[in-house]
């Protein structure tokens, strides 16, 4: 039986507008450790970047998309149907735009890097990376892990554009059920469509205009010695043809260093696991994109 999922984070009454003052990181971490998902307010500054990016995306022409496209690096504008949720015969029915902070210098060779859309995505990434680091630091604190897990230069933004056509009546999902294979995914869409599967039960995620959802990935499950569950999710195929845009921040640890698990201090090969997951979606391994 399908249930509706709706939850509102409490309003922060502090006068400061700094990003880290607008999220209860310990509570978010507690919810992720317990259930694998947490809905929170999207910081005010990021709300502006989010809605600007979605509005500006419509103005990007096909010629620009073709020029600023780097499939070998999972970067830039990527063709419709290029990625799939581990089932090659059912690709994701969306266009993608991916942005990596570590690649900004390479982007400067392209005129598109001066566009309003590019700047809006950069602004969003700058803030959401702070949010992700704060959440992860709180999770590490729960397990008394003092060595920080750095993420920014290995994580990336993905904008998914689900257009009205083509509709596929044979598909239950525009993006099939999967888990991302990362530490965390921070997701914000402009309309309903996201579903998650805590304990295997399908739940519809309903976000207010100023909310985002954080979900866990299997790299965090490994690091926590299976203490933290990973969260399967999917994007539904609506009965009425509507366009949907979402921005996801994929949180990936620095893969140039070694890791041991939080509780049992087990040696982990996160590079191999992360690359296997990334390739299972049709992408090149992270090591090849560095």
Image: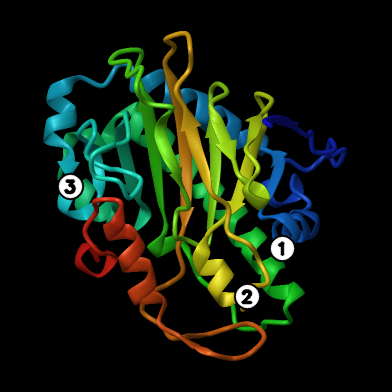
Using the image as rendered, state which of residue 78 and residue 14 is in the foreground. 78
Instruction: Return the residue found at the far top.
Output: 240
Q: Judge depth for marks 3 and 1 and give the one in front.
A: 1
SS state under label 1: helix
Q: Residue at x 71, y 66 (%)?
A: 138
Q: Judge depth for marks 2 and 3 and give the one in front.
A: 2
Q: Quadrant of residue 287?
A: bottom left
Are the residues flagged by discs 1 and 2 in contact, CB closer than 8 Å? Answer: yes
For label 1, the crowd category at 10 Å Cα-Cα, with few meaning under 14, some 14 to 19 and many 20 or more, is: many
Q: Quadrant of the C terminus?
A: bottom left
Indicate which disc, 1 or 2, sits on the residue closer to the N terminus: 1
Indicate which disc, 3 or 1, sits on the residue closer to the N terminus: 1
Indicate which disc, 2 or 3, sits on the residue closer to the N terminus: 3
Are the residues flagged by discs 2 and 3 in contact, CB closer than 8 Å? Answer: no
Is residue 44 shown left or right of residue 244? right
For label 2, the crowd category at 10 Å Cα-Cα, with few meaning under 14, some 14 to 19 and many 20 or more, is: many
Q: Which mark is residue 113?
A: none
Q: Quadrant of residue 221?
A: bottom right
Using the image as rendered, state which of residue 88 and residue 228 is in the foreground. 88
SS state under label 2: loop
Q: CA distance from mark 1 to mark 2?
A: 9 Å
Q: Residue at x 69, y 32 (%)?
A: 1
Q: CA distance from mark 2 to mark 3?
A: 32 Å
Q: Residue at x 21, y 54 (%)?
A: 73
Residue underneath mark 2? 224
SS state under label 3: helix
- Residue 49 appears anywhere in the view: yes
Q: Quadrant of residue 116?
A: top left
The percent coordinates of residue 42 (x first, y second) are 65, 37
Residue underneath mark 3? 71
The percent coordinates of residue 101 (x first, y second) are 37, 54
Q: Which mark is residue 33?
A: 1
């Amino acid at each position: 039986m399908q249930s509706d999922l709706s939850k509102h984070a409490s309003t922060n009454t502090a006068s400061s507008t700094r990003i880290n003052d607008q999220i209860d990181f310990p509570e978010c971490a507690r919810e992720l450790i317990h259930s694998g998902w947490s809905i929170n307010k999207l910081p005010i500054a990021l709300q502006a970047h989010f809605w600007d990016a979605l509005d500006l995306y419509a103005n990007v022409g096909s010629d620009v998309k073709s020029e600023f496209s780097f499939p070998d690096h999972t970067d830039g504008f990527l063709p419709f149907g290029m990625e799939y949720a581990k089932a090659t015969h059912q690709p994701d029915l969306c266009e993608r735009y991916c942005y990596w902070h570590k690649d900004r210098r390479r982007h400067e060779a392209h005129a598109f890097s001066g566009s309003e859309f590019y700047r809006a995505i950069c602004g969003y990434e700058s803030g959401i990376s702070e949010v992700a680091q704060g959440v992860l630091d709180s999770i590490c604190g729960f397990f008394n892990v003092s060595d920080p897990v750095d993420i920014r230069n290995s994580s990336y933004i993905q904008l998914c554009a689900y257009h009205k056509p083509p509709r596929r009546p044979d598909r239950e999902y525009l993006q099939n059920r999967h888990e991302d294979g990362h530490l965390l995914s921070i997701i914000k869409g402009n309309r309903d469509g996201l579903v998650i599967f805590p304990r295997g039960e399908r739940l519809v995620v309903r976000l207010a205009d100023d909310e985002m959802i954080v979900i866990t990935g299997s790299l965090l499950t490994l690091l926590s010695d299976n203490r933290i569950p990973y969260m399967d999710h999917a994007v539904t195929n609506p009965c009425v043809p509507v366009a949907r845009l979402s921005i996801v921040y994929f949180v990936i640890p620095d893969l140039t260093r070694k890791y041991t698990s939080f509780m049992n201090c087990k040696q982990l090969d996160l590079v191999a696991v992360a690359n296997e997951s990334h390739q299972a979606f049709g992408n090149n391994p992270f090591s090849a994109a560095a």
